[in-house]
Every structure is written in structure tokens, then in C-alpha cells.
Image: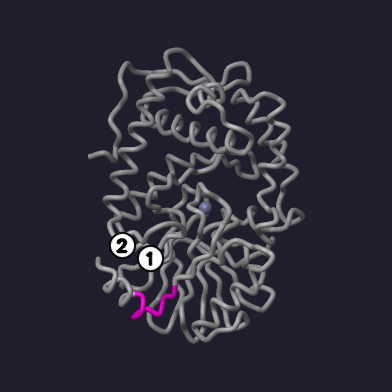
Amino acid sequence: MTLEELTSRLETLRVRPLTLEIPFAQAGKHVHFYLVEDSRPALFDTGLHKPDSSRWLEKALRKFGYELADIQRVFLTHGHIDHYGNARVFQNLGAEVYLHPADFNKVLTVEDHQAAVLVDLYAEEFQRHGFPASLVNDLGIVLSGQNEFARPIAPPTPVADGDCFTFDRFTVRTVSVPGHTPGCVAYFLGDSGVAITGDHLLHGISPNPLFELSVTGEKFASLVTYFQSLEKILAEPLELGLPAHGMFVTDAPELVRSLTAFYERRQSKIFRMLTEPVQAFALCQSYYRRLKRFDIFLGFSEMLGNLEMMAARGEISQNLRANRYVYERMVDKPIAFPLAS
Ligand SMILES: [Zn+2]
């Protein structure tokens, strides 16, 4: 797709990309979100909250002839701070905010979700994976996802797979794509082949699904689920993915192929390292070496995601022994990746 084709397609749909700088190198230092011009103007995601966010948003929207208060609907792709960070600004001005309920606990005020209960559940689970007690104590920092970059919101309106919303030029269809978070969705704009895909499909950035527990303490198999959602989105009529970071996605099958090849290499390396039964934390330390604080959490989430995928294929097993999870090989050679063909 040429740049002209791309521009004219967005013009026809009245979709206006907005790009805000963010201080996270892992995410490519910027976030895109999208204004859809309509008689009920809408934003898809809202960017990260910063002290001057409202002024920045005001200026960005004015370029297209809108004021902050004109935005009537805010559709969130998922509950990460660089996506919902400014949703409160619009909610306070009367906009309706939509989000998949599986991500509600990320965006609500601490009183509204069960942060205190969760910290204990995470601490217990991390200890079972071999985390040293000193690191478990740092967990509060990791889990308080709400920081200066996001303002908690009042309970949003839930969206579910298949939900449709009427716009002047098309109907928006919600497609649930859990993985990067449990509540990730993509929004398809009518039959245009264009979808706002959030963090589900990104060029050159691994989806890095984070370690997550439900409020009842169940582990979300993030990477396993992510790959199922990749298959799901490939079955959709997707010609142009509008992502939250990096370049637009004009060849989703190719992006999925390279991601699959990347994970296949990573998992065969992990398989080679599993010469004896081992815990995920120890494996993470020898795989990544020298990770610090929050990066340990990222690296560990990534390691566990890979181990869960390998276990789902029957390559390795996860056993709980004396309240410790231990991973070991079940076969002599890695089993072929289902998506690699
Ligand atoms: Zn995200």
C-alpha cells in the first residue's frame, strides 16, 4: 500500500492519527491514537497522561476543528497507561468510555479494584516461581500501574467481542484479541479493511504480555492466548492495521510470520537451557542476565509466557513441588511451532 493510498483511505474514513511522545523506550517513544470525525466524534485510545496533556490534546483536536468537549465517545483498545491515560479528561466532560471488562482493574481507582488483595496473591505466586523475598517486596511498585502517567477513571462501559457501534460512515465492530492484556480488543471500521489494533500487532516490538493474575488468583496464560488471538485476527478481513506504536501494519500475515519465527528461536534456546529441572526465575536470570527492578518483571513475564507455550505444546512440564513451580523437558527435541507453517 503506497503512502497516497493509505492517506486517502484514512481521509475517506475521516480517521485522524494523533501521535504523542512518551518516555518509554521499549514502546518506541511515542504512542498513536485516533480521532474519528463523526456527528458523534470519537477517540480510539487517549495517549499517556502528562501535566500538559489537556493543552496538547486541545491543540491537536483543534487542528481538525474540535474542542475537548466535542468528543462524545472514547473507545479503549486495552487498559495500559499509554492508552487510557487521558480518558478521564474526556469522561469528566461527558464522554462515554468503552473498555473490555477484563482490563477494568487496570484503570479504576485503587478503591474500586482489589489492589490490596492482588498484591498478596502476586507475592505468593512469585515466591512459587523462585523470586527472592527482597524482590517480592518491590512488587507494590510494579503493581501500582497507576502512576503519574495515568488518571484512574470512573467505571467504563463494557465492550465485548462482536459489539457494534454506529458511526456516520461505517459501523465499528469490536474483535476481542486477548493476549497483550486479557482485555485487548481491535476495532474494525466497517468493511473498509481498516482496524485500530492497539498493541496487538506491532512492528519490531515484542507484544511482551505481562504476568497477570485474575482477582481470584488465576494465572492468565498471556503468550499462549496472544498467539491464539493472532490466528483470530488473521482470519479477519484486515488490510490496514492502525497500531498504537510504530508503523502502520499493511501486511499482517508477514508480521505474524516474523513474530512466530522470533518466538520459535527464543523457545528453542530456552529448550536447550533446560538440561535439568529448573524454576522460571532462575531461568530468567540466566537467559537475560543483569536485569534490574522493573525489567526483571518484564523479563520474567516474557520467560513464563514462553514456558507456558512450550508446556501447552507438550514439550515441557510445569509441576508444583513443595509449593515451588519446576519446569522440565518432556521430550528430547523441540516440537514444531503450530503457526510456523
Ligand atoms: Zn499495552
Considering only vertical position in the picture, is 229 above or below 160?
Answer: above
Label located before the other in sequence (1 or 2): 1
Considering only vertical position in the picture, is 231 above or below 300?
Answer: below
Quadrant of the rendered structure where residue 219 is?
top right
Q: Position of residue 185 (x, y in %)?
A: 46, 59
Q: What's the CA distance linking mark 1 and mark 2?
A: 7 Å
How crowded is the residue under tag 1: few (<14 C-alpha within 10 Å), some, or many (20+)? many
Q: Quick check: is 13 in the magenta stretch?
A: yes
For the image, the number of numbered tags is 2
Report whether 304 appears left or right of 92.
Answer: left
The tag on residue 238 is 2
Report whether 74 appears left or right of 146.
Answer: left
**Protein image colouring:** one colour
Q: Quick check: is 259 in the magenta stretch?
A: no
Q: Position of residue 198 (x, y in %)?
A: 46, 59
Report whether 309 appears left or right of 60.
Answer: left
The magenta segment? 10-16
Viewer-closest of 98 and 30: 30
Q: Looking at numbered disc 2 in the image, what kind of residue is underneath it?
A: Leu
Quadrant of the rendered structure where residue 111 is?
bottom right
Q: Looking at numbered disc 1 in the image, what kind of residue is underneath it?
A: Ala
The tag on residue 195 is 1
Residue at the outermost left position: 341
Q: Position of residue 271 (x, y in %)?
A: 38, 22
